[in-house]
Image: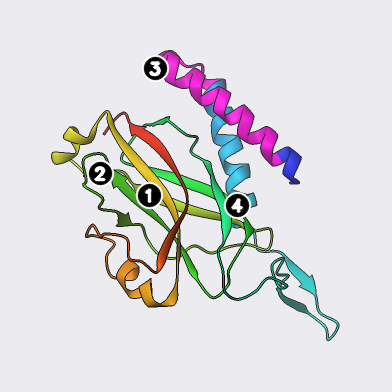
Amino acid sequence: MDDEVRKAHLRRLQLLELRAAREGHSTPPQVIMEIESIEKDLKLYYTKKEYRASPYGGWGPPKVMFENLPQDGFSVGHIEYPFYNADVHGRTCDVMGKFDKFVRSSEHWIAVSPDQAYGLWWPQGGCLEVNSKGAWYACNVFLGRELPDGIYDIDRTFEIGLYQVNPRAKDIFSKSSDVGIHIPSDAYLIHKIIVIRRSQ
C-alpha cells in the first residue's frame, strides 16, 4: 500500500464511520463490513515490517528509512487515526500514525488524558514499534474506566497524545501505565487529538 492509497483509505474510513455514527443500529451490514475491511488493511500497513535481501544470503533486518538522521533532536510525526473529535464506541480504541522524522535514541509513547484530569496523563501499553516506513500502531488504548465506574466516562472527552520520551524519562512512562503522571521535562508532546467516548 503506497501513501496515496493509505490516505484514500483513511478518507473513506472517516466517511463510513461518520455514517455509522449517524445511523447507529440502522447502519447497513455492508457498511460495517467495509469499515472492518479497511481497518484490517490499515493495521497491516502500520504494523508490517519490511525485510530486504541480504548480500550474504537470507534476509536482513528491516531497512531503516531514518538512518541518516541525527541521534538527538526532535521527532516529527502525527496521529492519523482516530480522527480529531471522533466518536469512539467502547472503552478502547486502536491508534495509528506515522513519523516524518524519527529520533532512534528516544522511545515514543501514546498517553491519554481525560478532561478534568488536571494535567495528568496515562501512558498506554509500552513504547511504540515503528516500521520501515515510519508507521506505528497502538492497539487497545484505554479511554477511562471499565464498568461499573466506566458509565461516568461516557460522553467524556479524552486527549490522546503522541510523546517522544528521552532516556531519563523512560522509567516514569514504563512504570506508570496504571497511574496518571505529570509529563516530565524529558518528554515532549509531538501531536495530540481529542476523541469522545460514546459507549461502555
Q: Residue 189: percent from the left, percent from the top?
A: 44, 55
Tell me the residue that label 2 is attached to: 144
Tell me the residue that label 3 is attached to: 25
User: What is the secondary structure assignment of the residue under circle 1?
Assistant: strand
Mark 1 crowd level (few <14, some 14–19, many ≥20, 10 Å Cα): some
* Three-letter residue code for mark 2: Gly
Q: Is residue 118 left or right of residue 162?
A: left
Q: CA distance from mark 4 to mark 1?
A: 17 Å
Q: Residue 82: percent from the left, percent from the top?
A: 48, 38
Which residue is more in the foreground, 37 or 49?
49
Image quarter in which the C terminus is found:
top left
Q: Nearer the viewer, mark 2 or mark 4?
A: 4
Q: Does the magenta-highlighted stretch encompass residue 7? A: yes
Mark 3 crowd level (few <14, some 14–19, many ≥20, 10 Å Cα): few
Boundaries of the magenta span: 6-30
Q: Nearer the viewer, mark 4 or mark 1?
A: 4
Q: Please give the name of the residue rendered at 60% of the width and 76% of the height, measured from the top-left corner.
A: 71
**Predominant SS of the magenta segment:** helix
Mark 2 crowd level (few <14, some 14–19, many ≥20, 10 Å Cα): many
The dot on residue 141 is 1
Please identify the residue farthest to the right as the structure is shown: 55
